[in-house]
Amino acid sequence: MSENLLIQITEEGADAERLATLTGHLRNELLRLDVEDVTVPRGAEAPSGARVVDPATVGALLVGLGHAAAGLQSVISAINAWLARGQRTGRRVRLELNGRVLDLSQASVADQKRLIKLYIDDYNASRAQP
C-alpha cells in the first residue's frame, strides 16, 4: 500500500494566487524525486473563473510516497531546501503522514534537523511494527 504525505504551505501575507504559485514551484521540485505522484488534493482547485477559494486547501499537495522508505527522507529534504530558499518570507510547511504531523518554519537549522530526524525515525519505527 502506498502512503500519501499531505503538505500544507503558508506564507505570511500571501494571497491565494501567491500560494498557488509557491505550490506549483514546490510540486515541480517534488516531481523530480522518486515518488509515485504529486497532486493537488480534491477540492483544492477552484473551477476556472471562480473567485472563491477554500482557504483550507490552497497551498496543499498530496505526495504518493510509494513503497520506498527513502522516499520520505528525500521529500522532506527537498521541502526543507525549498523552505530555506524562502528564508525571509515567513513560509511555513506542515506535513502530515499517518496522523503524524511535522511543522517546519523559520526554526534554526539545528532544530529543523532534529525535528526531521525524530519524525523520520518515528515513521520508520511505525513501518517496522506489524
Image: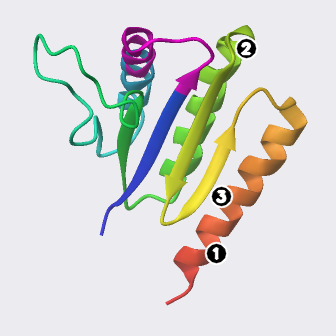
Given residues 44 and 100, the one toward you in this image is 44
The answer to which quarter of the image holds residue 30 is top left
Residue 30 counted in the magenta span: no
Return the residue at label 2. 87
Find numbered disc 2 in the image and state the secondary structure of the residue it sits on. Answer: helix
**CA neighbours of label 1 inside 10 A, class few (<14), some (14 to 19), many (20+):** few
Find numbered disc 3 in the image and state the secondary structure of the residue it sits on. Answer: helix
Please report the bounds of the magenta region as a residue range.
10-23
Q: Amino acid at mark 3?
A: Ile
Foreground mark, 2 or 3, reads 2
Q: Residue at x 53, y 75 (%)?
A: 127
**3D distance between C-alphas at marks 2 and 3:** 23 Å
Image disc number at residue 125: 1
**CA neighbours of label 2 inside 10 A, class few (<14), some (14 to 19), many (20+):** few
**3D distance between C-alphas at marks 1 and 2:** 31 Å
27 relative to 71 in the view: left or right? left
Q: Name which of mark 1 and mark 2 comes first in the sequence.
A: 2
* Vertical order, 100 against 94 (above or below): below
Q: Residue at the bottom extreme?
A: 130
**Percent from the top left, x then y, of residue 84?**
70, 19
Q: Residue at x 28, y 24 (%)?
A: 53
